[in-house]
Image (tube, rainbow, N blue to C red):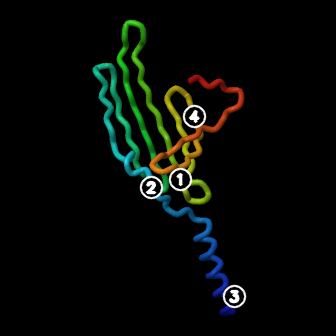
Amino acid sequence: MTSKWILTIVLSGFLFTSFGQQNPAWEKWALLMGEWVGEGSGQGGGTFSFKPDLDQKILVRKSHSEYPASANKPEIIHADLMVVYPDYSGSPNKAIYFDNEGHTINYSITYSDQLIVFTSEKVPNVRVYG
């Protein structure tokens, strides 16, 4: 009876540590974290934030910018949200982006020296403008 109890405790501990997500390491993101203000030369501006959320399990990026109307264009207001999150390995290798124009973009993230590289997934039958 005692050996079954010990085996149950050991297996339970293994399952909890194997499948529970740990806090991802956000050190490479430190320079981006915070709240930022973009100030144009009188032609627009906006705000940007990059903060950990959900007990440091994800990073949330929010952006809002406004550009005044001109003779040829109406006022433009852009807002977006991005969530960076860990994949099954616990490493922050995924992100998803949404904006008020209706775009949704899924990203894979890789790291190289001092770079963080976002690569979007290819979406069939969607033309990319660049």
Q: Earlier in the sequence, mark 4 or mark 1?
A: 1
**Amino acid, disc 2:** Trp
Q: Do the residues labelled 3 and 2 touch (CB within 8 Å)?
A: no
What is the C-alpha distance between the residues marked 4 and 2? Answer: 24 Å
What is the C-alpha distance between the residues marked 3 and 2? Answer: 40 Å
Query: In the rendered view, would you say 58 is above or below 35?
Result: below
- Secondary structure at numbered mark 2: loop
* Image mark for residue 26: 2
Judge depth for marks 4 and 2 and give the one in front.
2
What is the C-alpha distance between the residues marked 1 and 3? Answer: 38 Å
Q: Picture quarter containing residue 17? A: bottom right
* Image mark for residue 92: 1
Judge depth for marks 3 and 2 and give the one in front.
2
Q: Badge 4 is on which residue?
A: 104
Residue 39 screen position, x and y as percent: 30, 28
- Secondary structure at numbered mark 1: loop
